[in-house]
Amino acid sequence: MVLAAIPSPSRGVVHLGPVPLRAYALMIIIGIVVAVVVTGRRLRARGMDPAIAGEIAYWAVPFGIVGARIYHVLSTPDAYFGDNGHVADVVKIWNGGLGIWGAIAGGALGAWFAARRLGISLSLFADAAAPGIILAQAIGRWGNWFNQELYGKPTTLPWAVRIDPAHRADPGVATYQPTFLYEFLWNLVVAGILLFVDRRHRLGRGRLFALYVALYTFGRLWIEMLRIDTADEILGLRVNIWTSAIVCIGAVVALLVVRRPVDPDVSPEEQRALGLVQERSRRRPADVGVEPDAAARTTADDIDKATRAEATRAEATRAEATRAEATRAEATRAEDTRAEDTRAAAGEQPVTGAETGAGAVPSGRAQAEGPPAP
């Protein structure tokens, strides 16, 4: 007997006139916005231009969506290429079906490409972006609730999700495990852990992102074991379970083995590069008649020039210090000579090295006069 259950939305799309507003797509868009805002704030805290978050998202988001769809289609091919499948449904991402593993791989490829164009460290950006990415995943999971998909095994728990007859795996069962809710809560926990660790401990570059991957995949393991939607299996286990386990192990190994030095948040070279990036964000290459590739080369040339100029200034400072030291030494020797001449004129005994603390060897004038008469 079911005492309580989470109701499902009666529909996942609202029409604003002729324009359909699909809840699944809306959740993804909200998640992307949250990720960009959070990443921008974390970049600013590291001394970087927050506009870089949007610059990299411009490439990472489309790459991630394409990668997510490719992974979903490859992991559940029967729905598209099977006897009852429809190949045209491959492009209908608004109906659901985005694999997180493909999203991470595709998004990472896009971020790598964008980071190279901007001349910044991908690992530094990944550490800054990790909390925002997991928050975006948490928000995106509510799209599954609107679509009434990817739920778990039948259950009568008070927090079970009620599924409409058209979307049920078993026509005779109305309530199922709300795996979307479990993953939403787990992702919030992971985001909190990442923020806590990043504030209290300094990890080498890229290791916070590895921690994000390890924690997320650990939770995804047991969530996948609850799901009953159609998926290919290997040795009796869902493909996503194998993927989660392998990626989790790889992330843990990276955390234990990789020992990168704890660098400053932004190196001087990156600060100069990021200053140029900020300037280019205010003045786009197209506005000044410069091609993107030429702008990237200009950025690299400017960084090299700034580095050489800094080295020249440091060398000039050292040379000036050496000249000042030589001048002081010459003045000291001249003062000693004048003092010795004054004593000689007064008939005093010349000061020997022992008396000056410089050693037991007498001065040149004492050596010329010879030893005292017996």
Image (cartoon, helix red, strand yellow):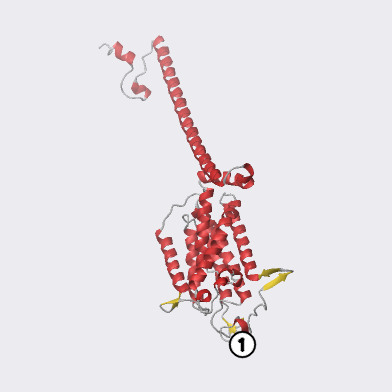
In the image as oriented, which residue stretches furthest toward the left? 374
Q: Is residue 195 visible?
A: no
Q: Quadrant of residue 360?
A: top left
Figure check: 331 above or below 311: above
Figure check: 54 above or below 277: below
| Quadrant showing the N terminus | bottom right
The number of numbered discs placed on residues in the rendered structure image is 1
Q: Is residue 49 visible?
A: yes
Question: Percent position (x, y) of residue 28?
Answer: 61, 66
Task: Classify mark 1: helix, strand or loop.
Answer: loop
Which amino acid, mark 1? Val
Comparing 152 with 260, the one in front is 152
Question: Percent position (x, y) of residue 20?
Answer: 69, 69
What residue is at 43 percent from the left and 16 percent from the top?
339
Label 1 crowd bin: few (<14), some (14–19), many (20+), radius 10 Å? few
Question: Percent position (x, y) of residue 128?
Answer: 54, 56
Comparing 290 with 25, the one in front is 290
What residue is at 41 percent from the left and 12 percent from the top?
341
Figure check: 73 above or below 359: below
In the image as oriented, which residue stretches furthest toward the right? 17
Q: Which residue is mark 1?
A: 2
Comparing 228 with 250, the one in front is 228
Q: Is residue 288 left or right of residue 307?
A: right
Comparing 32 with 203, the one in front is 32
Question: Percent position (x, y) of residue 106?
Answer: 51, 61
| Quadrant showing the C terminus | top left
Figure check: 87 above or below 266: below
Q: Quadrant of residue 294?
A: top right
Q: Is residue 272 left or right of residue 249?
A: right
